[in-house]
Image (tube, helix red, strand yellow):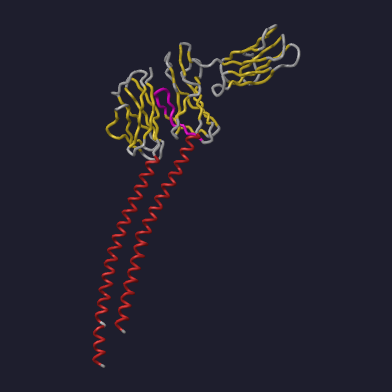
């Protein structure tokens, strides 16, 4: 009887060890999973928020070709950004894209874009396309004064 | 018996810890992510709503621009802007041909404001196209058209008071004073006798108020009161039906 009790008492050590090992494994795996989830979710949330902000900026762009003039100085185009976000803009007249670098127009600001080398005849009808880096366009039809 | 008890307790511990980890992940990763996404969506919707309002206000903007030289040969023009829309307007630029003149004028709805005077170079034969740009991106041209400077000065309207007398009279006395009261010598003072026809046109120097008195030798006065030539907001003439 005493021997049997001794045996039972000895067996009690291994469940404790196994419980500790199992808990450690669960905690380790859980911790890794937790850290991985948190990192992934944070990145996903930031990506999503960035994409929504970018989409909001795209739809927030508002600008016009305010005025066009052609004279001795060539073709001059004025852009007015009346939206609530800064824009970067280029213009295209016929096959000519101007300038090489994007022109920044701040919120509520104006930009004058000069094409001194552009040649047109009196009475020519020009279609001027102003487009932004975010992909919005506005069109302006201009007849060169005679 | 004791072995079975220990095994059950072990399973319980793992389940509790797994559940805790799951709940922890939910509260520290998934829910914040969903909140951030939701907030971004809300901001996007708010911005869309603001843009809808901006576009709607832009479409409702209704500004009438009247450009008028200060005199027949003056180098200055006044720009009167009448806001006939429901929304207030903010004018940011006046364009005189290809020259941009920055301005800062707020015009409440259903009211008007006068800007200027703006100086023009007065080159004979030259035309002057004057426009206004608002902060909502609308461009309004002059309602009075493109100004032309000729050899006799500005080509502007001829102002007149047109009188239509419907009653048969043989002796009319027409007097016109510049201003809103009959003070001083009249600008126009003419007696008309035995005149065939009953319509008269009196050319006056400018727009504004005139006091007109039309009397006949016998009977009560046909007209006695103030008239206004409202050009450029209105026609350059005014009718009097006597």
Left or right: A91, with B113 as reference point = left
Instruction: Kindly indicate the quadrant of the structure image that contains residue B191.
Output: top right
Left or right: A72, with B73 as reference point = left
Residue B106 position, x and y percent, is 49, 34
Instruction: Tell which of B186 and A46 is nearer to you.
Output: A46
Residue B239 position, x and y percent, is 63, 18
Q: Say which residue appears at 72% left-offset and 9% top-offset.
A: B170
Q: Is residue A65 above or below residue A39?
A: above
Instruction: Kindly indicate the quadrant of the structure image that contains residue A138.
Output: top left
Q: Is residue A135 above or below residue B140?
A: below
Magenta region, mostly helix, strand or loop?
strand
Which image quadrant: the C terminus of chain A?
A: top left
Q: Say which residue appears at 74% left-offset and 16% top-offset.
A: B220
Instruction: Tell which of B118 and B55 is nearer to you.
Output: B55
State yes or no: residue B78 in magenta: no
Q: How many labels, in total? A: 0
Seen as rendered, the residue at the extreme right is B219
Seen as rendered, the residue at the extreme top is B194
Seen as rendered, the residue at the extreme bottom is A1
Q: Is residue B58 above or below residue B187?
A: below
Q: Is residue A49 above or below residue B160?
A: below
- Which residues fall within the magenta stretch? B88-101
Residue B133 position, x and y percent, is 44, 30
Q: Say which residue appears at 50% left-offset and 19% top-offset.
A: B70
Which image quadrant: the N terminus of chain A?
A: bottom left
Residue A42 position, x and y percent, is 32, 55
State yes or no: residue B99 in magenta: yes
């Amino acid at each position: 009887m005493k021997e049997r009790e001794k045996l039972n008492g000895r067996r009690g050590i291994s469940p404790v060890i196994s419980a500790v090992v199992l808990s450690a494994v669960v905690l380790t795996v859980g911790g890794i999973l937790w850290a991985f989830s948190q990192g992934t979710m944070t990145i996903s949330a930031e990506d999503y928020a960035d994409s929504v902000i970018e989409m909001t900026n795209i739809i927030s762009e508002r600008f016009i070709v305010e005025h066009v003039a052609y004279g001795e100085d060539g073709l001059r185009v004025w852009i007015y950004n009346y939206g609530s976000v800064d824009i970067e803009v280029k213009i295209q007249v016929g096959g000519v894209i101007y300038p090489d670098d994007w022109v920044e127009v701040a919120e509520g600001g104006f930009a004058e874009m000069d094409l001194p080398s552009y040649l047109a005849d009196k009475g020519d009808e020009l279609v001027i396309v102003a487009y932004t880096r975010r992909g919005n366009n506005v069109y302006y039809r201009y007849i060169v004064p005679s | 018996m004791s072995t079975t008890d220990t095994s059950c307790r072990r399973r319980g511990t793992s389940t509790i810890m797994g559940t805790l980890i799951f709940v922890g992940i939910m509260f520290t990763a998934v829910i914040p992510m969903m909140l951030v996404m939701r907030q971004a969506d809300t901001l996007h919707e708010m911005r869309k709503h603001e843009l809808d309002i901006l576009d709607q206000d832009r479409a409702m903007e209704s500004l009438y621009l009247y450009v008028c030289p200060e005199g027949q040969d003056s180098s200055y023009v006044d720009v009167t802007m009448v806001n006939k829309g429901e929304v207030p307007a903010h004018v940011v630029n006046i364009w005189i041909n290809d020259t941009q003149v920055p301005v800062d004028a707020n015009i409440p709805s259903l009211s008007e404001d006068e800007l200027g005077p703006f100086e023009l170079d007065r080159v004979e034969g030259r035309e002057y196209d004057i426009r206004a740009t608002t902060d909502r991106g609308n461009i309004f041209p002059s309602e009075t058209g493109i100004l032309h400077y000729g050899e006799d000065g500005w080509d502007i309207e001829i102002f007149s008071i047109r009188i239509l007398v419907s009653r048969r009279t043989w002796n009319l006395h027409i007097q016109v004073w510049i201003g809103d009261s009959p003070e001083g010598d009249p600008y126009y003072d003419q007696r008309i006798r035995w005149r065939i026809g009953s319509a008269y046109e009196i050319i006056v120097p400018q727009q504004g108020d005139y006091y007109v008195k039309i009397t006949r030798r016998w009977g009560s006065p046909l007209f006695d009161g103030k008239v206004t030539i409202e050009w450029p907001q209105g026609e350059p003439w005014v009718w009097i039906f006597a």
